[in-house]
Image: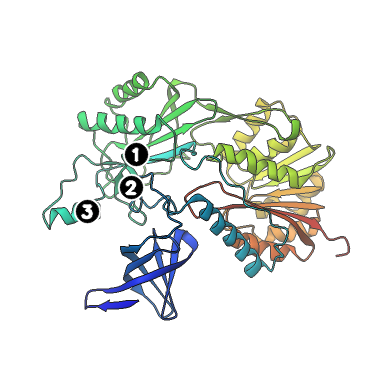
Amino acid sequence: MKMRKSKQEIILENVEIVDAAAEGKAIAKVDGMVVFVPFVVPGDIVDIKIFKKKKTFAEGRAVALRKPSPLRAELKCPHFGVCGGCKWQNMNYESQLQYKYKQVKDNLERLGGVDTSSMRPISGSDNIFYYRNKLEYTFSSRRWKTEEEVAAANGSPIDDGQGALGFHIPSVFDKALNIEHCALQREPSNQIRLAIRDYAYEHNLEFYDIRNHTGFLRNIVIRNTSTGEWMLVLIVAEKRDELFPLLDFIADKFPMITSLQYIVNDKMNDTYGDLDVVTYRGKDHIEEQMAGYNGGRTLHYKINPKSFYQTNSEQAQRLYSFVAEFADLQGNEVVYDLYTGAGTIALFLADKCRKVVGVEYVEEAIADAKVNAVYNGFTNTTFYAGDMAKVLTQEFVQANGRPDVVITDPPRAGMHEKVVEQLLLTEPRKIVYVSCNPATQARDLQLLAAKYQVQRIQPVDMFPHTQHIENVVELTLIKDK
């Protein structure tokens, strides 16, 4: 390894990438210092340009690939390394799974003191491309220019064109990358996006400027289901005459869209959870279905523009099946489903127990859960909206019955300390902990170890080509504590 220095830059030459790290970055070690580098693969030999240097670590980017790693895979996305998503797409899928498994194991052992001898092999996704059922794209009057464009311009101004329809560049709130092809959602997703963009170009419709809050077109949301239904939600800054010809164009060109809706968002931000949705053509929802566990009824979920539903439908089925396996319900249990979202896990288990009680802080999600419970004919489910730390009290347990089994699927931050305390006080015989963040899961498992022991551990890959991983842990009450 050789270092080349100048006043402007530090280049580390012929550096081996030795490991994968959090946030999709990889690791090199140079003279005892850890260097974090994105979009490279363990085993690569690269030149690294340093852009941030601290006492114990540095951050850089690869500026030359000297020798490719044997773990490398052929890229499917023309925007890899620019849009910021799918950071591991250049690594073969088997290796991705190995590093995700290692991530879970290391977090549980180092942060939670968990014995991982019961950890099962990771459950990978059968489809590693075109697996998402929801994508959201942003219109921006400011198009992100690639390094190649900047270099080719040689200092001359680059025409923004008519704006971009795509994804925000990480940490750049006011610019979007024009996406030509995304390998995350099956067709006609790309065709829909490109047709809307080209129509907007042709008809001189203004793309939104988030910095100055001017313009017309803001976002599109594309959702689909395994049953073949499609939803398109167009989000605009104001209700103009130009809106309806655009919606007619979309409906006529893509008749497979069964739910065409729009939202008027005149706020300073892109959130739309508090805004009205107008159905322009078709239904106000699409419908997903999922086979029940171990002979249970086939479930049907109504999904509206604001609904939460796992974005990898096939892997959601596997994830919930592992939860049901670990819960091992016999038919007479009271089950609590904490952080229930739209009640998808609660309904998946409802056939196998006496009663399910779901709790979630998002009121709209609970409304979805109640609708879907009725839609599927369940009469043994109850759902509550509220802050988990405030809802889950001794009074709540007395009113709803002491749980035999608790399912908990908290956000990335993990469970509130008061929730953990209440679980320890309530003493369900079993807890099944689903997590999208093994680090905070490990922290909570360490707290629960006061009365619970880990029985089984099952990692599940919901998001191929990313660093994200779901993990399911079965805990049983220690009788003599």
| Residue 468, visible in the rendered structure | no
Please give the name of the residue rendered at 41% of the width and 53% of the height, measured from the top-left corner.
90
| Mark 3 crowd level (few <14, some 14–19, many ≥20, 10 Å Cα) | few
Q: Which mark is residue 38?
A: none
- Coordinates of residue 267 in the picture (x, y in percent): 37, 43
Left or right? Give the position of 344 relative to 148: right
Figure quadrant of the N terminus: bottom left
Q: Identify the residue position indicated by label 3 in the image.
A: 148
> Considering the numbered disc 1 on the image, is that residue within a helix, a strand or a loop?
loop
Identify the amino acid type marked 2: His
Left or right? Give the position of 90 relative to 377: left
- Coordinates of residue 387 in the picture (x, y in percent): 63, 51
Q: Identify the residue position indicated by label 1 in the image.
A: 181
- Residue placed most toward the observer, 166 or 151: 151
Name the image quarter holding residue 167.
top left
Q: In 3D space, how far apart are the residues under numbered discs 2 and 1 (Cα atoms)? A: 8 Å
Q: Which mark is residue 79?
A: 2
Q: In 3D space, how far apart are the residues under numbered discs 2 and 3 (Cα atoms)? A: 12 Å
| Mark 2 crowd level (few <14, some 14–19, many ≥20, 10 Å Cα) | some
Identify the amino acid type marked 1: His
Q: Earlier in the sequence, mark 3 or mark 1?
A: 3
Left or right? Give the position of 213 relative to 262: left
Please give the name of the residue rendered at 55% of the width and 46% of the height, measured from the top-left corner.
462
- Coordinates of residue 334 in the picture (x, y in percent): 80, 42
Identify the amino acid type marked 3: Glu
